[in-house]
Image: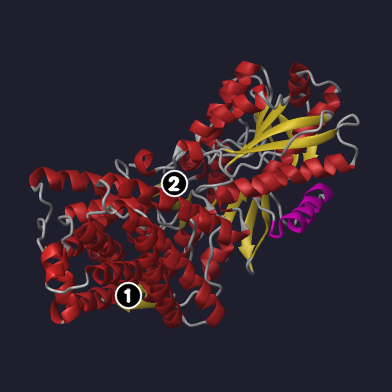
Amino acid sequence: MLAFELFMQGLVQGSIYALIAVGLTLVYGLLRILHVAHAGLFTLGGYIGVLVTNATGSLALALLTAMIAVGFVGMALYRFCYQPILDRPPYVALIASIGLFIAMEEIFRIIFGPYGLSYTAPPLQAPIILLGMNLKAAEILTMVGALILIGGLGVLAGRTRTGIAWRATVKDPQMAESFGIDIVKVRYLNFFIGSALAAAAGVMVALLNNLVEPTMGSVPSYKALAIIVLGGLGNVRGTLIASLALGVIESFGTIYLGFLLDRDAIAFAFLILVLMIRPQGLVGRSNG
Amino acid sequence: MKSFFGKVPFLALAGVLAAGAAAADTVKIGFNAPLTGFAAADGKSANIGAQLAVDQANAEGGINGKQIELVVYDDQASPKNSVPIANKLIGQDKVKIGISGSYSGATRAAAGVYQAAGIPYISAYAVHPDITRAGDYVFRTSFVGEVQGRAGAKLVGETLGKKKVVLIVLKNDFGKSLANGFKEKAALFGITVAGEYEYSIKDRQFGPIVSKVKADAPEAIYATGYFFTAGPLVNQLRAAGVTVPVIGQEGYDSQKFIEIAGAAAEGVVITTSLDRDSKSPETSGFIAAFEKKAGYKADMVAASGHTAAKVAIAAMRKAGTDDPKAIRDAIASITLQASTGKISFNKLGEVRKDVQVQVVRDGQWHHYSVISDDKLLAPPEM
């Protein structure tokens, strides 16, 4: 029974990782940039979620506002930060991204204060008993929400013309462009979707903890990098598997290895172990 | 990974609020605290608390006719910043006494610098035992972690009468020294530890630990941490249907804890230094003045910053000179009624005072009991 509870808790955590890491792997797949500032967008999503919920009382509206607003901020980051340095070596973008992330954390602190924000009346805190286990409604929303959002992404990528253009651009940007695909539009779309997913994760984490703070992106900033490496850089399916696997492994590890390694150390030990056996990641590098 | 994605050192001093060009005839008190980064909330409270003590003393005429100036630098709670700050305060700002409004890592590193320079240094609320061991110029106005942990054991085993306890331990020197003190005296109060789980300071999601604690079915939970970890923890424990008492410590001591944990905060009991319902004019006066100055409710960190600055000022007045040796001796022999109670120091420079027990009732911290047990609470002498 405890094992089942730990497994479910792992899936909740894994769903959050998935929402964050998918955007990161999309950006890497398209532009070969390690977008560390993505974790800042996750934090921004959390802040918008709490502020809008507190102002209007509607979590649905807050989630929608956070996703759309952060989606646009993600596009702006691409336009003003990454686009001007795309022709430089990749480490230039990485350094810019780290700087941007630190700046974002401090901007959150200056605007929203160092104490973090909480919901005045936190929604979805009611316990729901599922298969004999107490789960918060917010935990169920996190899992179901991640499933719907990422499922929707799968449909968009697999079944629509936009999705085909997107995948073609990832696979071979020059060829895609010569077929008349506007690759700049694809990049904006990419940043919009990835950032919106991170914002959704931020709103959900805020619900689970009833706290958003300026530094809440600091763990995801590096753990999401580990996850996309695990999943095979640029591979969405692999990233999802890696996210859920890591969530579950951390969940059991926290209890049974906690005296030895903390949660982050367990995550990175797992990463090292996998890369020793499968250098290409759990699923391997995708070409499209 | 932390060093790679951590804050770039040269940014450390950005946003520092140095108190500007100083007039020649002021007395300077050095102050380091985390004003940015993860511990910025505590740094801000400690800073406002210390500044309040300075303002109050200046209104009374300062020190022997001179106005007092608090020279503040941001250390981001990191030793790599606190050491250069200590050197700067001593060498450039020429302070005659320093105060740490920071965490243990930063304070411990800076303490060595102050000791070597022969300038007194007071740690407001950092708990690591080695801080005062830096030497005879280093003092502390808060409990060492172990002492407060021992008080926690007495609270759980004797006052609350709970014998089967699970420990949830924040894995840093603060959380671990509290847990060590608790375990050291657990048997004395008939407590058995049914389980012990550790978490890192960055954790906010405790799902797996909560599940395991539920399976352990303890009579009480002793959880070490800060308001920003304990708030989510208590919230998640209650949401999972764990209803047994949760006992915390001064790290919880903030109105913010109650805000984060929400209704789940009700009934949480902590050991701390600040009694919200105190009849002492010193304490109630501080609580009112702090809320007026800061715009939010006083917490333990604020009271500790205020106490440390008050000790520094009282010692400088008593010494009557700006000779650091005379100021040190004045601190060592001081007895003072401060916002955190009546305090004095032992020969290691550790504070002697009662432990305040507070409980959350109707969304506010309130008086629960006081633990005054000189033997149990005796700070280390060496």
- Residue range of the region highlighted in magenta in the rendering: B281-297
Left or right for B163, reference B127: left
Residue position for label 2: B170
Image-based side of B364 in relation to B328, left or right: left
Residue B356 visible in this rendered orientation of the protein: no
Drawn side of residue A282 relative to residue B149, left or right: left
Between A162 and B253, the one nearer to me in the picture: A162
What residue lies at 17% left-to-right and 55% top-to-bottom?
A: A233
Subunit that carries the residue with mark 1: A
Image coordinates of residue A203 in percent, x first then y, are 41, 70
Residue sitting at 71 percent across and 24 percent down? B94
Please tell me whether mark 2 sits on a helix, a strand or a loop. Answer: strand
Q: Which quadrant is home to the N terminus of chain B?
A: top left
In the image, what residue occupies the spot 28% across and 54% down? A86
Q: Main secondary structure of the magenta part?
A: helix
Q: Is residue B59 above or below residue B100?
A: below
Residues beneath discs 1 and 2 located on the same chain: no
Check if residue B285 falls in the magenta segment.
yes
Which of pointers 1 and 2 indicates the residue nearer the eye? 1
Give the label on residue A140, or none.
1
Query: Image height check: is B341 above or below B159?
Result: above
Subunit of label 2: B
| Coordinates of residue A8 in the picture (x, y in percent) | 26, 67
Q: Do callouts 1 and 2 mark residues in contact (Cβ within 8 Å)?
A: no
Observer-nearest residue: A148 or A186? A186
Residue kind at label 1, given as amino acid type: Ile
The x and y percentages for residue B301 are: 64, 46
Q: Which element is circle 1 on?
A: helix
Residue at mark 1 to residue at mark 2: CA–CA distance: 27 Å
Height in image: A140 above or below B265? Answer: below
